[in-house]
Amino acid sequence: DSGVTQTPKHLITATGQRVTLRCSPRSGDLSVYWYQQSLDQGLQFLIQYYNGEERAKGNILERFSAQQFPDLHSELNLSSLELGDSALYFCASSQGRSGGLQETQYFGPGTRLLVL
Amino acid sequence: EDQVTQSPEALRLQEGESSSLNCSYTVSGLRGLFWYRQDPGKGPEFLFTLYSAGEEKEKERLKATLTKKESFLHITAPKPEDSATYLCAVQAGDGNKLVFGAGTILRVKS
């Protein structure tokens, strides 16, 4: 158990809908990262938050957004869902003392999203 | 653009048959190379971090090594419970993101 929690574990929805994925980092960790894992793309970085502020952005679609709250939990919002958004979504956290540089990222169990 | 290539894509071993997994990378300014293990439907589980060429780390039957261009994950006398996908990732430049390879699927048969 990494100490990172994610809810829900599974999510089934229809195209065009909007969903919210939730992540609680390990106790004391300030940085939260979101990754998408699909069969054809592997694990891809989406976005990082550090102590409530956006720190880095990857290939995140404009239909996707995220935020980190004062209690350090994070939410990833996916809107106007398409079939191709079906994937595993992972949250990871790190201490954040150096903003994330050279820090080990610990991953949560993931949310499996299926868009029908 | 940072790139990570893992080989082989899949590896089948008999219990006790030692082998190595390869991770080659092309990056600007390596800050760290990370090995993770992932079981089906689960999140990646951290194994090792290597920061500089020549560094080695060990944990039970696993040993990770790093050169300037690649890393190896050596598995000594594997057991069926070592079956998993092994992922290699790099952190480079001034970014915090991890760039992952496609992984090596390891199957160990008894």
Image (cartoon, grey):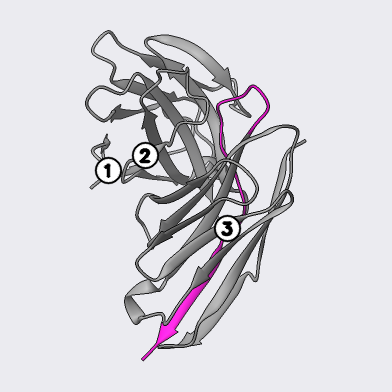
* Residue at which label 3 appears: B65
Q: CA distance from mark 3 to mark 1?
A: 24 Å
The image quadrant of residue A70 is top left
Residue A98 in the image, given as x and y percentages of width and height: 46, 18
* Residue at which label 1 appears: A2
In this view, A71 is above or below B2: above
The image quadrant of residue B38 is bottom left
Q: Identify which residue, B95 or A18, lies in the foreground.
A: B95
Looking at the rendering, the stretch of residues picked out in magenta corresponds to B92-110
What secondary structure is found at the residue carrying circle 1?
Answer: loop
Q: CA distance from mark 1 to mark 2?
A: 6 Å
In this view, A41 is above or below A48: below
Q: Tell me the quarter of the image containing the N terminus of chain B.
A: top right
Label 2 neighbourhood size at 10 Å, few (<14), some (14-19), many (20+)? many
* Residue at which label 2 appears: A106
Q: Nearer the viewer, mark 3 or mark 2?
A: 3
Chain ID at mark 1: A
What secondary structure is found at the residue carrying circle 3?
Answer: strand
Q: Identify which residue, B60 or A53, lies in the foreground.
A: B60
Label 1 neighbourhood size at 10 Å, few (<14), some (14-19), many (20+)? some
Q: Identify which residue, B68 or B42, lies in the foreground.
A: B68
Chain ID at mark 2: A
Pointer 3 and pointer 1: residues touching (CB < 8 Å)? no
